[in-house]
């Protein structure tokens, strides 16, 4: 999926928009009902490891892709949209990467998906993965089906850390698709995940009322102490 300048308008090069009765006159252009979904182009559907490599060997690697381009790798029958019935009650884990690392981490994730390496996760819980190439950072995200099951979500986080060999100090972010629908954003307003035990310790240590911005994620930024840790925690990227 490619956004911005140079992105393809479906059907535009096939003569769509022309009146067959009067080829010189153009019909009034109709906007697609779901412009995001219409901008996603299916490259291939693979059912075996051999079919996967036949396709993957010819793909441009993420590090070489232009900015605002995404690769999606999803189970057949699941659209890479928040609204899809198999995604709507779920969310995604987000790993933010400094530029130059996307190809390596993306390959690790998709090989883990086809190799069933997400052990300890219920079958069918992982819907797919996305790599997003952006200006200042690249992002790999893993989508799951059930955002309300904290135990499953935390086990998925641990599996991602194990597969990507992430250092223990790297903080990950989780965002339910319901929240993305509300703020119309994939990666804004996400918050660093904290284990339940850490949240309980913070709650018991606070004896005053504080104003903390909540966005639907399962953790809060460290604004209570007057500043956010996010820039510090991102220094690993």
Image (cartoon, rainbow, N blue to C red):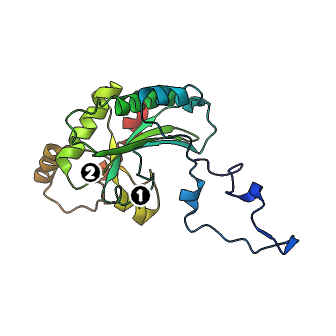
- In depth, the one of 56 and 82 nearer the eye is 56
Above/below status of 24 relative to 232: below
Percent x, y of residue 47: 42, 36
Percent x, y of residue 235: 42, 32
Percent x, y of residue 59: 58, 31
The image quarter in which residue 36 lies: bottom right
Residue 174 shown left or right of residue 60 in the figure: left
- In depth, the one of 142 and 55 nearer the eye is 55
Name the residue tied to disc 1: 82
Q: What is the quadrant of the C terminus in the image?
A: top left
Above/below status of 1 relative to 15: above
The label on residue 219 is: 2
Q: Residue furthest right?
A: 24
Camera sees residue 169: no
Residue 79 shown left or right of residue 119 in the figure: right
Above/below status of 40 relative to 165: below
Q: Residue furthest left?
A: 204
The image quarter in which residue 129 lies: top left
């Amino acid at each position: 999926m490619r956004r911005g300048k140079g992105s393809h308008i479906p059907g535009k090069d096939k003569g769509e928009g022309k009146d067959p009765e009067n080829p010189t006159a153009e019909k009034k252009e109709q906007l697609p009902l779901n412009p995001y979904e219409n901008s996603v182009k299916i490259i291939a559907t693979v059912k075996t490891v051999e079919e996967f490599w036949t396709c993957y060997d010819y793909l441009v690697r993420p590090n070489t892709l232009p900015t605002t381009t995404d690769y999606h790798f999803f189970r057949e029958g699941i659209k890479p949209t928040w609204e899809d019935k198999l995604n709507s009650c779920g969310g995604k884990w987000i790993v933010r990467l400094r530029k130059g690392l996307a190809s390596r981490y993306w390959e690790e994730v998709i090989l883990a998906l086809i190799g069933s390496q997400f052990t300890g996760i219920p079958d069918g819980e992982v819907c797919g993965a996305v790599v997003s190439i952006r200006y200042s950072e690249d992002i790999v995200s893993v989508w799951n089906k059930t955002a309300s099951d904290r135990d499953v979500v935390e086990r998925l986080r641990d599996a991602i850390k194990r597969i990507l060999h992430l250092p223990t100090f790297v903080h990950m972010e989780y965002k339910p698709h319901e929240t993305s629908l509300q703020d119309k954003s994939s990666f804004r307003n996400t918050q660093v995940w904290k284990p339940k035990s850490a949240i309980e310790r913070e709650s018991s240590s606070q004896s005053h009322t504080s104003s903390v911005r909540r966005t639907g994620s399962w953790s809060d930024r460290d604004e209570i102490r007057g500043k956010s840790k996010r820039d510090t925690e991102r220094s690993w990227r």
